[in-house]
Image (cartoon, rainbow, N blue to C red):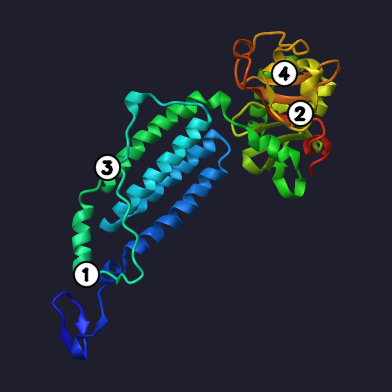
Amino acid sequence: MARAHDGEETGHGGRNIHRPKRAREELSWSPEASQELLRLRFRTLRTRFDDAETVADVHEAWGVVAARLNDMEGMELDLDAVKCSDQLTRLRQQWQESNTAQLHEDDQYEVPISPEPAPASPQQEMPSARQVDVQAVEVEEFPRQDEIMRALEKRSRQFERLAQSLELQAPIAALVTMFKRFSVDEHVSTSSKVKSSQQRSIRSKVLEQYTDLEPYAEMFMPKKAPMVVAKCHNHIQIVLHEGEPLFFNQRDGPFMPTLKLLHKVPHVMKKVRADKGAIPFVLSGANVMCPGLTSAGGDMPEPLEAGTPVAIMAEGKEHAMAIGILTMSTDDIRNKNKGVAIEMVHFLGDDLWTCSHID
């Protein structure tokens, strides 16, 4: 049996019966295959961005993208990586624009865009090994993997600064979305006693946020009684006392009392009042807009900073109808008087309100 000069074994008539692995990979790397692989990869990575609901989720998704591109090896994959990184860059920029955030212009770094290959005709044949070699030489003109990773690292640092600037204004739609349709069986992953150190930490954070709760702390969070925390989807945890939900938070965000607890100790939380026109929207889970607080029926009795959890009172009513987080300071709410003033978290009638016990 003869052996071809490129290491391929040939039978009678020069027919190939075996090719080294590298040759098989090169011959199978057609433009059509490249585009299909790109679509599959990008579809998976984009899903991570579409599912992201907070700044941390998007940052985590971007880290996965960078790691995925870092795993790509081989000359042919570089071209695909450039296309993929460029599309993901545009996707991340769209996400930033939706949050009305801008990066510093002098820090911009654009990943070069590779030209789109011409669509293959139905009669196009698989390229030969010689043709693939020519394509490989052309790929050298595009940025190498290390250049792509440098661009990703720089954008990652930019995004880190962006995430820090948006930390207090991070969207918390996951909370209100989950509590609208909250089910213990569906949304609670685990419910267990926490270590004494974690119990002290949670207790300390809650009392630091709500200093007026100190006289009642032993009623709701006794030091000697075990504390149970239910861990839910979207990094949400609910602090329980004898199975009753008392406080909740998301990741390292502020703890907020449930409305049932707030109605027992209504003075422990900062308050704002929405006018009558906003009531039906609030009770359906909508965010509170600035005009609902600045109109004649609205009220913001004290200056508060963005990121402050607040009890949302209703004009003419005694008890809070919802809990949310300010997206801007009360001064900005008065001055701008447009846009979302409070991100809704928990409201009367949602499933956290109707949930009286978690095992």
Which residue sits at x=74%, y=32%?
Answer: 285
Q: CA distance from mark 1 to mark 2?
A: 65 Å
Q: CA distance from mark 4 to mark 1?
A: 69 Å
Instruction: Name the foreground residue: 97 vs 213.
Output: 97
- Foreground mark, 3 or 4, reads 4
Instruction: Specify few, some or many for label 1: CA neighbours under 10 Å numbering under 14, 14-19, or 20 or more.
Output: some
Q: CA distance from mark 3 to mark 4?
A: 50 Å
User: Is there a contact, CB below 8 Å, between mark 2 and mark 4?
Assistant: yes
The mark that comes first in sequence, 2 or 4, is 2
> Taking 205 as reference, is 139 above or below it?
below
Which residue sits at x=73%, y=38%?
Answer: 179
Q: Amino acid at mark 4?
A: Gly
Residue 227 visible in the displayed image: no
> Taking 102 as reference, is 25 above or below it?
below
- Foreground mark, 3 or 1, reads 1
* Residue at mark 2: 281
- Which numbered circle lies on residue 145? none
Quarter of the image with the C terminus is: top right
Q: Is residue 261 left or right of residue 72?
A: right
* Residue at mark 1: 129
Instruction: Specify few, some or many for label 3: CA neighbours under 10 Å numbering under 14, 14-19, or 20 or more.
Output: some
Q: Quadrant of residue 151?
A: top left
Mark 4 falls on what kind of element? helix
Q: Amino acid at mark 2?
A: Phe
* Residue at mark 3: 147
* Residue at mark 4: 292
Q: Quadrant of residue 221?
A: top right
Residue 205 on image: x %, y %? 65, 23
Q: CA distance from mark 3 to mark 1?
A: 27 Å
